[in-house]
Amino acid sequence: MTKPNGSTEKQKSEFKGAGRHNGGGMEKESIMKKAVILIAILTLVATGLFAADGAAVYKTKCASCHGPDGSGLTAMGKAMKLRDLASADVQKQTDKELNTWTADGKGKMPPYKAKLSADEINAVVTYIRSLKK
Ligand code: HEC
C-alpha cells in the first residue's frame, strides 16, 4: 500500500483548488469529489483488512485455556482455576493490566509478547472487553 495519507492530502488540496474557480469547473469538481470519496473508501477498506483481528487471535491462541466465551470452563482452564474473563473481577482491571498479563504472562499463563504484535495484543484485549456480560 502506498502512503494513503499522503495521497488523500494531495487530493484534498486539489479539490479545494477546483472549488475556488468559477465557470466550467463543475464537471472537474464532481470528478475530484468522486476521487476523494473513492480514496477515502479504499483507505477504510485497507485499514479494515490490515487491522489486527482480536476475535481471531483469541480463538486461535487463548480459547484453548480460557474457553471460547472466556469462562475458563475448559479442561485446562478448570485445572488452572481460571477466572471468567467476562467477570467483574477481571473486567475491573485496566486495559494496561490486561495488556500486561497477555504480553508478559501471569502465573501459569504463558507470555505472548514474542508471538503477538502490540496491535494484536491490543485487539485481543478489546475482544476480552466485548465478552463482558
Ligand atoms: C496455557 C493456558 C493459557 C492460554 C493459552 C492463555 N492463558 Fe490467559 N491465563 C492462563 C492462566 C493460568 C491465567 C491465570 C494466571 C493467574 O492469575 O495466576 C490466565 C490469566 C489471564 C488473564 C488475567 C485474568 C485474571 O484473572 O485477572 C488475562 C487477561 C489473560 N489470561 C489473557 C489471555 C489471552 C489474551 C490469551 C491469548 C493470547 C491467553 N490468556 C491465553 C492460562 C492461559
Image (tube, rainbow, N blue to C red):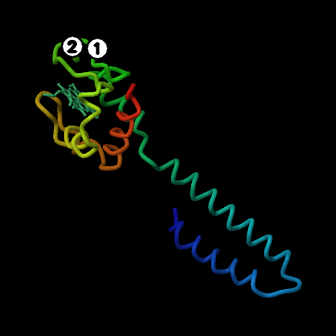
In this rendering, the answer to whether 132 lies above or below 124 is: above
- Residue 102 got which mark? none
Figure check: 111 above or below 23: above
Residue at 85% x, 74% y is: 27
Judged from the image, the secondary structure of the residue bearing numbered disc 1 is: loop
Left or right, residue 114 beside residue 45: left
Tell me which corner region of the image, top left, top right, bottom left or bottom right, holds residue 123: top left
Residue 111 location in percent, x, y? Answer: 18, 38
What residue is shown with label 1? 73
Mark positioned earlier in the residue sequence (2 or 1): 1
> Measuring 37% from the left and 40% from the top, which residue is drawn there?
126
What is the quadrant of residue 66 in the picture? top left
Instruction: Identify the residue at image location x=33%, y=39%.
Output: 125
Residue closest to the eye, 20 or 91: 91
The amino acid pointed to by label 2 is Lys
Give how far across and how far down residue 47 sits, in percent: 51, 53
Mark 1 crowd level (few <14, some 14–19, many ≥20, 10 Å Cα): some
Quadrant containing ligand 1 reads: top left
Q: Is residue 65 left or right of residue 51?
A: left
Compare residues 131 and 27 and report the one nearer the observer. Answer: 131
Circles 2 and 1, Cβ within 8 Å, touching? The answer is: yes
Where residue 128 sits: x, y (%)?
A: 35, 33
Q: What residue type is disc 1 on?
A: Leu
Q: Look at the picture and state if 30 lies above or below 20.
A: above
- Helix, strand or loop at label 2? It is helix
Beta carbon at label 1 within 8 Å of ligand 1:
no
Q: Quadrant of the C terminus?
A: top left
Mark 2 neighbour density, 10 Å: few (under 14) some (14–19) many (20 or more) = some
Cα gap from disc 2 to disc 1, whole angstroms: 6 Å
Residue bearing the label numbered 2: 78
